[in-house]
Image (cartoon, rainbow, N blue to C red):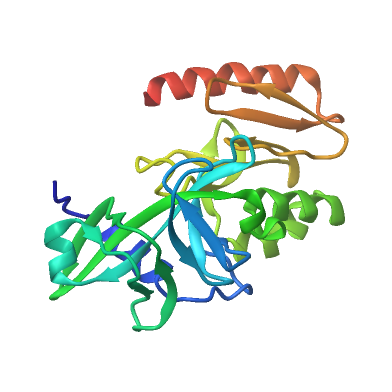
Amino acid sequence: MKKNFLLIFICIFMISCKGKVTENKRTHYQEIIDGPANFRDKINGKLIFELNDSIGVQITDFRKEWCEAGLFIGISETEYRNGQLNPNRKIKNSRNKTIGITKDSVDIVFDGEEDGKYFGFIAGFTHKNNIKEKYLLEKELESYINNNSRKKSDFDFFINNFDLELKESFLNYESYFKYENWITDPSPGFRILLLFEESELKGVLHSRSLKLKKSNTSKVNDIYKVTFFDDYPKGKQDNFISSIKEWLNGVD
C-alpha cells in the first residue's frame, strides 16, 4: 500500500540521500556505514543489498550483535508503482551518485513523490561490525562526557554539533534532547535527554544502551532508562523517576 509522507519524511529523505556523511556536524538521525556492508532480509538471512563505505543510515538498537538499518533513496516511477527494486540494480542518492547495489529483490518499505521525483525507504539487517561504532550517538556521548567536565558550558559544543533541541522547564530540569530516528519510532520518542540542574549535567534519560563512569542506571519502563551520576542525591533521582513515569503515562 502506498504511503503519503509528511514534510518531515521528505526532509529526512533529502538528508539521507546526500551520500557520504560529513562528520563535522551530526544534525541528522544517521549512523555511518563501515563498508562495503551487506544487508540481509533477516538476521543471518538472504543477502538483499550492499552499501558503500561511509553512507549514512538509520539503525535500530542492536540485538544479538545485529540491527535493522535503512535509508531513503531515489526510485523510478515503475519501482514506485511496483513497490520493489530488482536484483543488480544500482542504489543511487538524490544526486544520482551510486552508493550501493541490490543483490536480490528489495521491498520498498515506504515511498512517496515530490515535484515529480520518487523516493523510497529500503531496509535490511546488518551486523554491528558494519556500523562505525565510534560514530554511534551513544558512543559519542560516552566519550564526550568522559573527556569533559559536566558543566553546561562544556556541553555547548556537543549540543550544537548534534543539533539537540531545548525542552524548556522539563520536570524542573534544563533539558536537551534528540528524538529516536524514523526506522525505530515514527512517532517519535526520545533517544537521549540530557538533564542539567544548576548548569551541571546530572543525568541522561535514554532509550538505548549507555555506559557512563561513576554513575548508576535505573529502568523507567520497557523503553527508557535513566542514568544519574553517583554524586547526585538519591532522593532527587527517585523523584525524577517517579515524575518521568507519571509524565510518560500522560503522554501515552
Q: Residue at x 59, y 16 (%)?
A: 242
Residue 52 picture location, percent across and down? 53, 72
Residue 27 picture location, percent across and down? 52, 64
Quarter of the picture holding the C terminus:
top left
Q: Residue at x 79, y 54 (%)?
A: 143
Residue 177 picture location, percent across and down? 55, 47
Q: Residue at x 69, y 55 (%)?
A: 133
| Residue 238 sits above or below residue 145 on the image | above
Q: How many marks?
A: 0
Q: Is residue 28 visible?
A: no
| Residue 76 sits above or below residue 39 on the image | below
Residue 121 picture location, percent across and down? 32, 57
Q: Nearer the viewer, residue 214 or 70?
A: 70
Q: Residue at x 57, y 35 (%)?
A: 207
Q: Quadrant of residue 224?
A: top right
| Residue 201 sits above or below residue 248 on the image | below
Q: Is residue 138 visible?
A: yes
Q: Nearer the viewer, residue 171 or 83?
A: 83
- Judged left or right of residue 169, residue 158 is right
